[in-house]
Amino acid sequence: MEDNYPVSRRWEDLDTDILVRIFQSFDIFELTSGIAHVCSAWRLACCDPLLWKTLDLSMLKSNFIKIPLEPYVYVDGRSDKTLTRVLKISLSLSRGNILTLIFHFNLYVSDDQLTYTAERCPRLKRLVLPAWNRIKKTGICKAIRAWTDLESLTMPSIANPPYFMEEISRNCKNFSELKIMGPCDMLCASTLVTYLPKLKVLSLRCSMLNKDALIMILDGLQHLEVLNISHCLLIEVPPPPAVRKVVKELDHSILERASRLRQFLTCMEDSCLMCQRTKNDEGLMRWYKYEEGLWKADEVSSLAL
């Protein structure tokens, strides 16, 4: 009599599409933990483009301390080694298929790490990079030159934006969405108008926003369709010796200018928790104080993570 026991299949004999579906439930640490070295079938599945449309490193943070001099943070060497290891394995497995790249706001990338990443993500369309403390002008410009397909960027506010916006203008012809996680003053606004006149979506939420800068943006960005200033601390800066004051509500001139937009997202309510937090943080949100992942939110759906 023959035994009627079912024949068991080995893991490596599973169809590639089944393995890919299983691996889609893994986070970045699990994907880079060595499963690609189990066998050739698993490595093939680990390199499937479906797994690498987005490289989400938002669960990875630097172990750092603040220091009084530039770059104002000191990152522990073990943090750098961890990030470098994850980047090398991920970028090897992705085979240039990454379209969206997300870094945590407390993940301080170095110039070398950014350059290495840019060279291996030539098709990148969306970049979320909210911390630039360790990135120098040459490093970010080199990366932008590699990302000619870039369409969307989330970044911090920087002291000297013209060089960077000019680099985007020169190299990223399809660029249309920008989120700035930090104050927007007259220099920032004039830079946007000068170098990114075709910008369609702009989010400045939870930041200090100069009223004249807002007017300049509304007047100068004629292709703008969506503007988010929700929970902003809107300030008016009169000539000296008068002191700046907080604007409590939008006046008719701003509302009239914004009426042409498809979406003008605002919130300036005293009862709003996020508005209270922006005010308490004086227009520079200290995201580490609040719920993990809150920094990823945005009223503009295409900019939310």
Image (cartoon, rainbow, N blue to C red):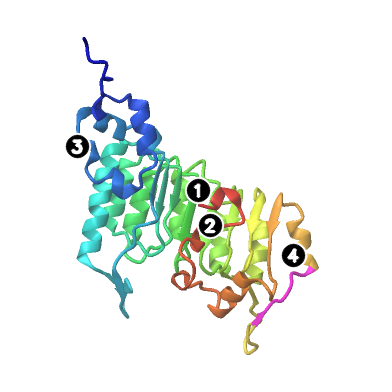
Q: What is the magenta segment's predominant secondary structure?
A: loop
Q: Secondary structure at mark 1?
A: strand
Looking at the image, how many numbered discs can be counted on the residues?
Answer: 4
Does label 3 or label 4 sit earlier along the sequence? 3
The amino acid pointed to by label 4 is: Ile
- Which numbered circle lies on residue 152? 1
- The earlier-in-sequence mark between 2 and 3 is 3
Does the magenta run of residues contain 13?
no
The crowd level at tag 4 (other Cα within 10 Å; few <14, some 14-19, many 20+) is some
Marking on residue 37: 3
Pointer 4: what residue?
Answer: 254
Disc 2, disc 1: CB below 8 Å? yes
Classify mark 1: residues with Cα within 10 Å, few (<14), some (14-19) or many (20+): many
Disc 1 residue type (three-letter): Ser
Badge 3 or badge 1: first in the primary sequence: 3
Q: Residues within 10 Å of mark 3 (few under 14, many from 20)?
A: few
Chain-order first, disc 2 or disc 1 = 1
Amino acid tagged 2 = Lys
- Tell me which segment is drawn in magenta: 245-251
Residue at 48 percent across and 55 percent down: it is 154
* x then y, percent, for residue 27: 36, 47
Callout 2: 10 Å neighbours few (<14), some, many (20+)?
many
The amino acid beneath tag 3 is: His
Q: Which of label 4 and label 1 is nearer to you?
A: 1
Quadrant hosting residue 217: bottom right
Q: State which tag comes first along the sequence, 4 or 1.
A: 1
Q: Is residue 97 visible?
A: no
